[in-house]
Image (cartoon, rainbow, N blue to C red):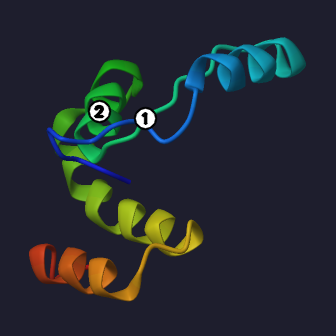
Amino acid sequence: MVDAASHVSLMSADDLTSALERKYECIVKVNESVSSFLRDVFVWSPRDVHSILSAFPEAMYRRMIEIEVREPELDRWAEIFPET
């Protein structure tokens, strides 16, 4: 996950999303930042704002572990959201 103005995508999302959309017959959206991901959550989730904001820190932490985010970044997330 990257959330920086100087970020340059490390992958060609167009080819990947097209292939996935054809294979699974659904819309695929690639998010390369937490802010982009959270924005999409607000747009697509049927849940209310309070519910989304309450659940997000822990859900994001679990996902960061799944995708093997480096330990210092996990620690940083835990400092920002101590309830995770």
Above or below — where is 69 with respect to 49?
below
| Image spot of residue 31 (x, y percent) | 43, 35
- Tag 1: amino acid: Asn
Which residue is at a point 33% across and 37% down the rendered structure image? 8
- Sequence-first disc among 1 and 2: 1
Mark 2 is surrounded, within 10 Å at the Cα level, by few (under 14), some (14 to 19) or many (20 or more) other residues, namely few
Q: Mark 1 highlights which residue?
A: 31
Regarding mark 2 in the picture, which secondary structure is present there?
helix
Q: Residue at x 35, y 32 (%)?
A: 41
Residue 45, image x, y percentages? 39, 28
For the point 19% across and 80% down, which residue is it?
Answer: 76
Query: Badge 1: few (under 14), some or many (20 or more) residues near its Cα, within 10 Å?
Result: some
Residue 80 tag number? none
Q: Is residue 83 above or below residue 6?
A: below
Please name the amino acid that badge 2 sits on.
Answer: Ser
Looking at the image, residue 11 sits to the left or right of residue 75; the answer is right
Count all numbered tags in the image, as a single digit.
2
Residue labelled with disc 2: 36
Q: Position of residue 2 (x, y in %)?
A: 31, 51
Position of residue 16 measured from the top left corner of the image (x, y, whole percent) = 70, 26
Which residue occupies the extreme right position in the image?
A: 23
Residue drawn 56% across the image and 66% down it: 67
Asked if residue 67 lies left or right of residue 36, the reply is right
- Mark 2 and mark 1 in contact (Cβ < 8 Å)? yes
- Which quadrant is the N terminus positioned in? bottom left
